Image (cartoon, helix red, strand yellow):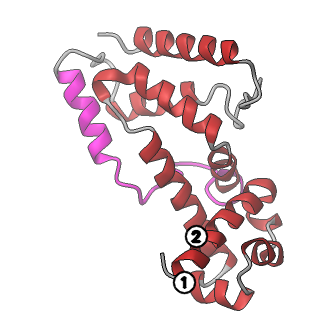
Amino acid sequence: MDKAQASRRRLLEAGAVEFAAHGIAGGRVDRISVRAKVSKAQMYAYYGSKEGLFDAVLADQVEGILDAAPLTADDLPGYAVRLYDAYLAHPQLVRLAGWARLERTPAGHLFAEADETPKLRAIADAQDAGHITGELPPADVHAMVISLAMTWSPGSLTYTATTADPAADHDRRRSGLATAVRRAFAP
């Protein structure tokens, strides 16, 4: 990794911490710059603006979750559990998405530019193969599985799990989540 790539990576990591804690409006470029050990001028050269940095941070976090929890349409329960684990390991993504929803996109698709066609096609193919109920559109199945996986995430209205919770609690949640998804989308 060259020096510029290392600076960008530090900015993305520092931006994730700052924006997850304070949102877009409350996030401070000064704090990000200090944490990343990159000048504000350099940050602006890389990302154009604080909003540009937020966009890059959110995209980076989403990419990390996609890598950590790939969609396997013929195993939606496993996908949901992988999402639970990814949200547990990287709670800042849920917080960042929450801030984006609150401060930018209050309705409609949060990631309108994202191409979900491969995921939705995989779900449709699993429906055609009889692995998933065909009573729901693929986009609805996908949205509901994501929401179920977020039950104990920082976006939860009832309880947010952390890595400090007892392993038995995580095992119980994973098992319950897999069972709920299996039953909800069984053909």
Above or below residue 115? Residue 74 is: above
User: Alpha-carbon neighbours of circle 2 within 10 Å: few (<14), some, or many (≥20)?
Assistant: some
Query: Residue at position x 38%, y 15% from top?
Result: 185
**Where does the magenta region start and end?**
101-128
In the image, residue 127 lies in the stretch drawn in magenta:
yes
Above or below residue 47? Residue 148 is: above
Task: Name the residue at the left extreme.
Answer: 129
Above or below residue 57? Residue 89 is: above
Determine contact: label 2, label 1, CB under 8 Å. no
Front-most of residues 164 and 29: 164
Give the quadrant of the C terminus. top left
| Disc 2 target residue | 9
Q: Position of residue 51 (x, y in %)?
A: 65, 73
Q: Is residue 109 visible?
A: no
In the picture, the disc for residue 4 is 1
Residue 82 in the figure: left or right of residue 8: left
User: Alpha-carbon neighbours of circle 1 within 10 Å: few (<14), some, or many (≥20)?
Assistant: few
Front-most of residues 36 and 69: 36
Residue 40 in the figure: left or right of residue 133: right
Question: What is the secondary structure assignment of the residue under circle 2?
Answer: helix
Q: Position of residue 82 (x, y in %)?
A: 48, 30
Residue type at mark 1?
Answer: Ala
Sequence-wise, the earlier of marks 2 and 1 is: 1
Q: Is residue 174 visible?
A: yes
Above or below residue 156? Residue 102 is: below
Residue type at mark 2?
Answer: Arg
Question: What is the secondary structure assignment of the residue under circle 1?
Answer: helix
Query: Residue at position x 83%, y 65% from top?
Result: 26
Mark pair 2, 1: CA separation = 9 Å
Query: Residue at position x 77%, y 28% from top?
Result: 164
